Image: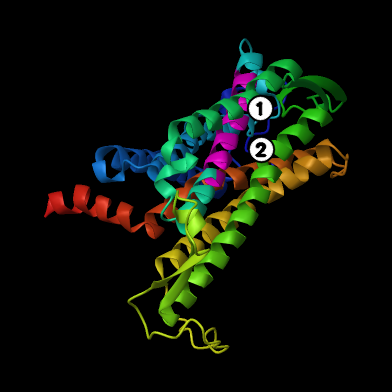
Amino acid sequence: MKLFSLAADLTITDIQWQVYPIGFLLLLLWLLTIFGNLLIIYVIIRENTLHTSTYYYIVSLAFSDFLVGLIVMPFAFIFGMTYDEYWLFPRHLKFLCDFWHSMNIFACTASIFSVCTIGLDRYMVITKPIEYRNVFLSKKWFYVLLNIWISSAIIAFPAVTLFGTVQETSQQSLNQTLSTSIISLKECQFPDNPSYVLFMSIFSFYLPLTIMIYVYIKVYVAAREQVIALHSGYKRHNRNKCAKSQRLSLDFVIVRIHHGKYRDPTMKNENIHSNISRKTFSKDQKAATTIGLIMGTFVFCWLPCFGYLLLSGVFSIRLKNERNHELLLKIFSWLGYTNSALDVLIYVFTSKELQMTFSKLFVSRRS
């Protein structure tokens, strides 16, 4: 459905709004995306205690989501409300269309890469807490961020320049004499080259998705092991992984945890799992829950878009009606953009550090 319906002899005073509720919801989504991500960036920059690699990755995510709200969403709204985009931008349609699609792919890919990197970072924190400060993700965070944005630019800009995005279509129009005529329209459409669609889908979505699934499984297993250790009172730790010296006689050490009732590590107790309280959550469990929430939101928002894009662009499996096809693709695209707004809510409600900083900067000053 188009928000505007244009005929050949239509003037701006004849434009009729058709979908007020949708426009209002999109406006709220846009405001949350813009100001929510700006607020997160401001808070992290302002608070010195948050100047860590983990929160630098969150800043990268917030900035990419901010670009989605600043550039991608407004143009998606404008280009989605008319049948003939040339009517709006007669002189600069090609430039604006190429710029929009380039920034669309660039910002969304950077956002996806940032989410994937945050998941990997949390995985390292949980599985290698002692060595974390020396791992590449923590020590060389600048190079990781540089790789995120350069890779996103390589995926986005050259292809749009090469394949182009402005396409001419024909449409039947009914004039005042009740006779039909074919008019030529220019529309801003996504690059439809099958090879590029396949390349972009794999590297912008399916590869990061595979990594995130693997990371979540590993984090969940590590969280369960941590809970078992908390309730058993001991934890086995591989010495070779936590010490640089290779002259140690034992392969592992048994660490005494001053929490819960101690059990002899040499004794087999098959009831440890069943005795774990569901109400007890360790820090690792919360991290696993957060990563699961991030991944679930990510899959819910982006899988329909990239799934249908792959089916229609590579395998030609699509709706036969052209308008219905475009409508479905735009709905899935806006669902993907929604992820940029939901990221704000996820990190604000799951990060105690951000909550404390918000309270310190805004609530404390008022009181």
Residue 31 appearing in the image: no
Where's residue 70, x and y in %? 47, 31
Disc 1 is placed on an element classified as: helix
Name the amino acid type tagged 1: Ile
Name the amino acid type tagged 2: Ser
Whether residues under marks 1 and 2 lie with C-beta atoms below 8 angstroms apart, the answer is yes
Between 334 and 314, the one nearer to me in the picture: 314
Disc 2 is placed on an element classified as: helix
Residue at (25%, 39%) from the top-left corner?
Answer: 46
According to the image, label 1 marks what residue? Answer: 155
Alpha carbons under labels 1 and 2: distance apart? 8 Å
| Crowd tier of the residue under label 2, counting other residues whose Cα lies within 10 Å: few below 14, some 14–19, many 20 or above | many
Residue 337 picture quarter = top right
Residue at (23%, 54%) from the top-left corner?
Answer: 359
- Magenta stretch, main secondary structure class: helix
Between 199 and 359, the one nearer to me in the picture: 199
**Relative horizontal placement of residue 346, taking residue 353 as reference (left or right):** right
Say how many tags the image has.
2
**If the image is split into quadrants, where does the C terminus sit?**
bottom left
Between 275 and 291, the one nearer to me in the picture: 275
Residue at (52%, 72%) from the top-left corner?
Answer: 224
Position of residue 169 relative to residue 37, above or below, is: above
Region of the chain picked out in magenta, as a range: 96-116
| Crowd tier of the residue under label 1, counting other residues whose Cα lies within 10 Å: few below 14, some 14–19, many 20 or above | many
The answer to which of marks 1 and 2 sits earlier in the sequence is 1
Position of residue 115 relative to residue 188, above or below, is: below
**If the image is split into quadrants, where does the N terminus sit?**
top right
The residue lying furthest to the left in this view is 367
**Relative horizontal placement of residue 25, taking residue 85 as reference (left or right):** left
Position of residue 27 relative to residue 127, above or below, is: above
According to the image, label 2 marks what residue? Answer: 204
Q: Is residue 135 magenta?
A: no
